[in-house]
Amino acid sequence: MLIAVALIGMACGYVGYEWSIVVARKAWVVAHPPRAFLRTVEKGDRRQIPLIRRLIGDQQQSVVVVVTEDEIPMVRSLFPEADIAYVGLLMNLDIP
């Protein structure tokens, strides 16, 4: 009985942790209006997000575009499966 309770507690802790990651990712996307989030992920890609996160509504990103260098560490931790594209220098150019 004690082992069953421990296993259930571990499973709930794991789901809770994954849920907090999904909430943080969704909050970042809402706080940073649509830029470019490419969701083209090939089947068998090794950088897939865990099944539990897909089941609770998370979406895998292939590329996330950031505008400032300050965002890169946060985005890299929130979207480890994605490639990070930094376009800050391009955004600051005065192109006639």
Image (spheres, helix red, strand yellow):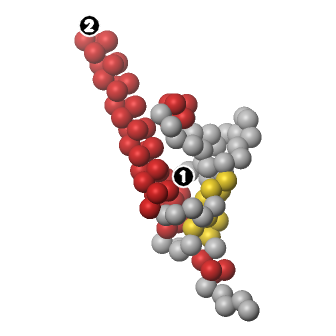
Question: Please, what is the three-letter code of the amino acid marked with disc 2?
Answer: Met
Foreground residue, 91 or 6?
Answer: 91
Q: Is residue 18 left or right of residue 80?
A: left
Question: Please, what is the three-letter code of the amino acid marked with disc 1?
Answer: Phe
Number of numbered callouts drawn: 2
SS state under label 1: loop
Q: CA distance from mark 2 to mark 1?
A: 38 Å
Q: Which residue is mark 2?
A: 1
Estimate how packed mark 1 is, as few (under 14), some (14 to 19) or many (20 or more) residues with alpha carbons within 10 Å.
Answer: some
Name the residue at 48% across, 72% down.
Answer: 70
- Judge whether 35 appears above or below 58 on screen: below
Q: Position of residue 85 (x, y in %)?
A: 64, 65
> Can you tell which mark lies on residue 53?
none
Q: Which residue is mark 1?
A: 79
Name the residue at 73% across, 35% down.
Answer: 43
Residue 41, picture quadrant? top right
Q: Position of residue 64 (x, y in %)?
A: 61, 59
Name the residue at 67% across, 39% down.
Answer: 46
